[in-house]
């Protein structure tokens, strides 16, 4: 079971890195080319402001998911370090609450996704659901990542509540 969870977690990390690299590179190139065109030719590409706006939420959400995988998105360590043997139970309960809240946000984003599908961007005519879909998928993925990290929480804290490895398993 742990190997399946690690494979899912690693697959999500790989996919998020790909999204992050592609969107960051594309946004940088599009904006650089558009700025160069403004100075050189006095004109710009009409779609050059719209496409980065569509890519930006995907870039941010990929970064948030990677941060969550490294335990740096939501972390309250000062309180949990004082708990001793109860630490792993508190971290587990906190992780389950966080996963449930992320899943709730994904479910809540669905009606907004449906509404946004009818809206179109002015120049490229891309449905608004592309940006909202990023939130829906991102929240669902954050829920999955949080659940995949639960075994790591248990491995990183021994029965006496002492840290046995790095803080990567720290989710709450």
Image (spheres, rainbow, N blue to C red):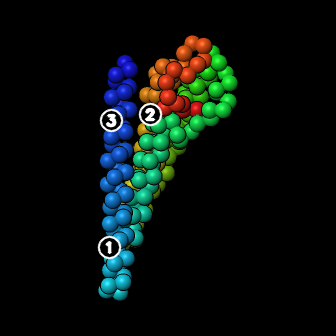
Residue 118: percent from left, percent from top: 41, 59
Count neighbours of disc 2 (C-alpha within 10 A) and say few if under 14, some if 14 to 19, many if 20 or more: many
Q: Is residue 56 left or right of residue 15?
A: right
Q: In the rendered image, is residue 103 in sight?
A: no
Q: In the rendered image, is residue 5 in sight?
A: yes
Count neighbours of disc 1 (C-alpha within 10 A) and say few if under 14, some if 14 to 19, many if 20 or more: some
- According to the picture, the residue beneath numbered tag 3 turns out to be 11
Instruction: Please tell me in which quadrant of the rendered image residue 57 appears.
Output: bottom left
Residue 69: percent from left, percent from top: 45, 36
Specify the label residue 33 is tagged with.
Answer: 1
- Looking at the image, which is closer to me, 67 or 112? 67
- Looking at the image, which is closer to me, 53 or 31? 31
Q: Residue at x 46, y 28 (%)?
A: 149
- The mark nearer the N terminus, 1 or 3, is 3
Dot 2: element: helix
Tell me if residue 68 comes above or below residue 156 in the rendering. below
**Marks 2 and 3, Cα distance to the nearest angstrom?**
10 Å
Instruction: Give the mark toward the camera: 1 or 3.
Output: 1
Residue 83: percent from left, percent from top: 67, 21
- According to the picture, the residue beneath numbered tag 2 turns out to be 145
Tell me if residue 128 comes above or below residue 165 in the rendering. below
Q: Are marks 2 and 1 in contact (CB under 8 Å)?
A: no
């Amino acid at each position: 079971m742990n190997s399946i969870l690690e494979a899912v977690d690693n697959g999500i990390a790989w996919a998020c890195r790909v999204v992050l690299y592609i969107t960051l590179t594309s946004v940088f190139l599009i904006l650089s080319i558009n700025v160069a065109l403004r100075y050189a030719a006095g004109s710009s590409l009409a779609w050059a402001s719209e496409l980065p706006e569509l890519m930006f939420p995907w870039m941010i959400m990929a970064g948030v998911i990677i941060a969550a995988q490294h335990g740096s998105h939501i972390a309250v360590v000062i309180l949990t370090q004082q708990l001793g043997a109860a630490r792993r139970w508190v971290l587990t309960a906190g992780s389950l609450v966080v996963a449930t809240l992320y899943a709730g946000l994904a479910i809540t984003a669905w009606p907004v996704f449906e509404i946004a599908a009818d809206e179109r961007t002015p120049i490229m005519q891309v449905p608004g659901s592309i940006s909202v879909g990023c939130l829906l998928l991102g929240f669902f993925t954050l829920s999955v990542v949080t659940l995949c990290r639960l075994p790591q929480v248990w491995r990183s804290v021994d029965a006496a509540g002492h840290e046995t490895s790095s803080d990567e398993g720290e989710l709450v």
